[in-house]
Amino acid sequence: MNDTSNRPILVLGAGIAGLTAALEAAETGRFVVLVEKNPWVGGRVAAFHQYFPKLCPPSCGLEINIRRLERNPRIRLLTGTRLAGAERIEGGWRVILTRAPRWVTDRCTACGECTAACPVEIPNPFDQGMGTVKAIHRPHAQSWPERFVMERDACRQGCHACADACEYGAIDLAAEATTEELEVGSVVVATGWEPYPLEKLPELGGGVLPDVISNVQMERLAHPGGPTGGRILRPSDGAPPRRVAFVQCAGSRDVNHLAYCSGVCCLASLKEALYVREQLPGAEIAIYYIDRRTPGRNEDFLEKVAGTEGIRLVKGKVGKVLAADGGLELVVEDVEAGRRLHERADLVVLATGMVPSAGDLPLPVELDEDGFVLDDPASGVVPAGVVHRPQEVASVVRDATGASARAMAMAGGRA
């Protein structure tokens, strides 16, 4: 390209931050290349049951954004794609994008015949490993692009049952990865976050006791499209819990795990306590916390939940979660009473924190001590969303809007 001002903006990640940044730039007239490592867009928000504080489903907002995406010719979406390399050039970046083999092509009509024919079941990645799906499946009921995906590594050697069942010829078992080189004016990094692994919290039963789950797993349990059809049930026996405990700062604000506060965990647990209360009105619910962090207008949401019958908020640090008589026992330091408590529960939900997903990017971005991407106006790279700092969805949208504006300014030229 001779005119560097015409180079597109590259957006890495098509979660709510990346979608927002891409749409805002494209709707001002800029061309955007939107790259997503998964075969679908929407990120972690797509897996949530409800937003706080309004307690409405995220599918509404995502559907609106996907329609905007579909109708905008200035956005080129590349799913199943990763940034493999980047080189600083005058007026922007030269980047290398690697696209995974497309075992299921654009011919797919999402009819489901391939899934019916597939003989292999795997843990469902979208449901955080809870429940199973076939090795070829639709990622979730509202996934877009509306195309099935294949976990090729899970397939039996020589099996081609799915391809035989597809009357549209949409399955290419010989597909290979492809590589593309582009010149872009600037880069928005919106690669999102990962939940802190349960397996790193064995003292709290994480990865050890089946009825100890994470907050993101609770979102899937409560979701109508989740592994239990929206019923909150104990993983061990499929029974509805009579006592549910929420453990705050599970691995957060802890020098042995995540030193920082993820900012949204208190609100997420308050929201999930209402899930339980609405579905299981007779259940006893306790939230064990160090501090209650619900800034701004979210304080009203805290007061609402704290005043709900059947929900207790206990200022206390949970030190251990143990198996006990068919249930669970929590060893809690009750800070206000100055004593140790031994509390019982049937289901424990750990409020695990947000871990930024930026450490392996082939870009010279500067990270803080916790792995979040720092702003560097001279770099031609702009962070957006949780990869920038811990934040809830509304803040992510505002942050991504600002990131889009900065990326357009860095890329130069007219909108």
Image (cartoon, rainbow, N blue to C red):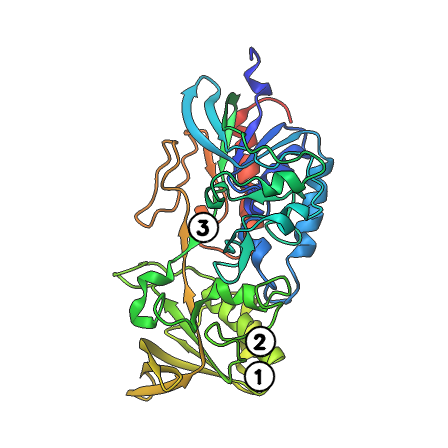
Residue 226, horizontal then vertical, whole percent: 59, 63
Measuring 38% from the left and 58% from the top, which residue is drawn there?
196
Residue 400, horizontal then vertical, whole percent: 55, 44
Decide: is 224 above or below 125.
below
Q: CA distance from mark 1 to mark 3?
A: 31 Å
Q: Are marks 1 and 3 in contact (CB under 8 Å)?
A: no
Quadrant location, the N terminus: top right
The three-letter amino acid code for the residue at tag 1 is Thr
Disc 3: which residue: 193
Direction left: furthest residue: 256
Measuring 41% from the left and 71% from the top, which residue is drawn there?
210
Q: Is residue 401 visible?
A: no
Q: Secondary structure at mark 2?
A: helix
The three-letter amino acid code for the residue at tag 3 is Trp
Which of the two discs, 1 and 3, labels the residue nearer the N terminus? Answer: 3
Which of the two discs, 1 and 2, labels the residue nearer the N terminus? Answer: 2
Q: Are marks 1 and 2 in contact (CB under 8 Å)?
A: yes
Disc 2: which residue: 274
Quadrant location, the C terminus: top right
Decide: is 39 above or below 73.
below
Measuring 65% from the left and 45% from the top, which residue is drawn there?
144
Q: Disc 1 vs disc 2: which is toward the camera?
A: 2
> Does residue 80 appear to the left or right of 414 in the view shown?
left
Q: CA distance from mark 1 to mark 2?
A: 9 Å
Q: Tell which of 77 and 157 is nearer to you.
A: 157
Residue 313, horizontal then vertical, whole percent: 45, 81
Q: Quadrant of residue 56?
A: bottom right
